[in-house]
Amino acid sequence: MSVPWGVVAFATVLAFGTAAGSGTRPGFRTRITQRGLDYARDVGLDIVSKEIKQLKIPDVSAQSGGAKAKLYDIKFVKQPEPTASVVPLHELGLRLAVANINAELSAKYGADIKMSFFKMKSTGTIRVVTENMKLVLDTHIGRDNAGRPSLYKFFCKGSGVIRVTFKGGWSNLLNLGSKVFQSKIRSVIIAQICTNTIKEIKRQIDLHVIPVRETVAEDYELDFSMVRFPKFEPTHVELYSKGEINIKDRHIRMPFSPPEIPLFHQHNKKMAYVYVTDYLLNSGFMAAFKNQQLSGYVNESLLPAQVKDFMKTTCPMSLCLGSLLPNIGKRYPGAASSIHIYATQSPTVHVRGASIGLAGWGVVNITVTDKDGKEQPVMSATLSGTANFTVHVSNSRVFFNIVKLTPKVTVVKSAVDDNGLGAILEPVLKIASEGLLLPRLTDLGFEGIPLPKVKDLRFVDTEILPDKTEHVVIVGTDIRLEPYDPDAEDEIKKTLEMFQSLPKISMSSSPIFADVEGSSA
């Protein structure tokens, strides 16, 4: 059996929004416009005709006066070309309206005709013509306790005219009572279309298995469960998702809430709009901070070959830590150094349209390995920094550009007597970030990150709107239903490989170092 086009429409809508208590603020909101619903209608319009033509209509029996007839082997012989629409039902769900189901059917009949003084049997064929047949299917959509969408009520009704013409034995007499058969056949056809469509929707869209959480970086998960019932307005549907990244096996309570997402009545040109708040990234950073994973260290073995010398304390012909901080080189000549970093609070992200600002705070500890192979603390400093990005979307890829990267360092303790260490360390960190991290991030930003792929669903003509709303980035996109493309997985793998090619920072299980011995800076 072919899939009713209504299934395609519902699947398209639900794919966008599914991916808490009533009234909870969402981390992101999705709008499906009338254009999006119309596309779902256009994609599936040919399917409804096939579904009707392949209907298995059961036998129909009726009686009119002294004539009793049974119709069987009822088939569609003329393909209908209906029109259809999908519109929101205010505060309830979606309405599927199919009109002009004008078809022609054929059937065989067997009749028993009883007169006052004799009985006769006759057989023949009938011709059934439908006119102005209409079908309306209302689907009420909510959410279950897990935050999945829920199709919890269906209402289906139909109307129209059916004309029946008997050809064969006693056809004139049977045609006189054909109104009885017309009513019966119409009821059966409408009931069959309604029953099959609802059954197929339930079969194809098993909402109980739709995931509402996705694993991110092994230890975390993105929660995109629905936090409110969907909102059905005359011109669009809106879905409200949690949009939070949390620790996978032990969720923490976020000390902040998502910002309010304003209403944007003017957004109707694209098929869909997604309003993503900076709560999404801020919750992820908070989860990583609470999970003690915003700490790490860098040493010579983790750096690319061309900059390995930077971590040495002696380098007569090149730039290294020892040449920038001479007293370290004098005290620990020929030694290798390590930089240990850990966050003192969760980084924060501020979004304003296509501009993203990132701020972070932490502590930097520099150590050297002495002649005996022991790690000696040299210096401790507080670190703060900001980074500014701009993002845009083109050809189904997200591109970004780092506008500014600014570290600030204040030395707290030092085991060497270098004056103005803070003033020296700031350019050191700037050189390190701009020389090591920035080029790779720039390459990644130039290469772009592929938009996420939903099976059989492709986002096209996607753009980030040039809106300056605080805390929200607005993405508008059109939709195409296409067969699953395994090459999409290769694109994602390539992007992950680019991330893995960035300069490595190993994670430290004990980020807090012992106090540095020596003079306070």
Image (tube, rainbow, N blue to C red):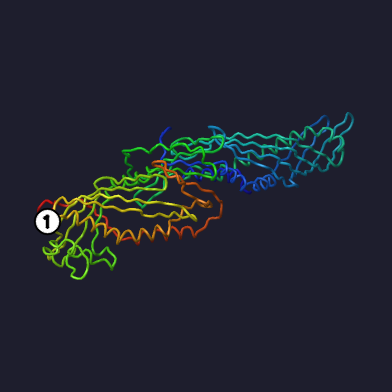
Against 372, is 231 above or below? above
Q: Residue at x 64, y 46 (%)?
A: 45
Residue at the far bottom in the pictured view: 317
Provide the residue designation for mark 1. 415
Residue 292 pos. (x, y %): 26, 48
Residue in front for this viewpoint, 257 or 144? 257
For label 1, count other residues whose C-alpha is less than 10 Å away and answer few (under 14), some (14-19) or many (20+).
some
Residue 345 vs 152, above or below: the answer is below
Tell me if 335 is positioned left or right of 104 in this view.
left
* Residue most extreme to the right: 117
Q: In x, y percent, where is residue 402?
A: 36, 54
Label 1 SS: loop
Q: Nearer the viewer, residue 361 or 293?
A: 361
Count numbered badges in the picture.
1
Q: Nearer the viewer, residue 423 or 224?
A: 423
Find residue 326 and report its image quarter: bottom left
Q: Say which amino acid is labelled 1.
A: Ala
- Residue 271 position in % (x across, y down): 54, 45
Residue found 35% across the figure and 37% down from its top: 257
Q: State the residue lying farthest toward the left.
A: 518
Viewer-proximal residue among 245 and 515: 515
Q: Residue 75, position in %: x, y? A: 74, 45
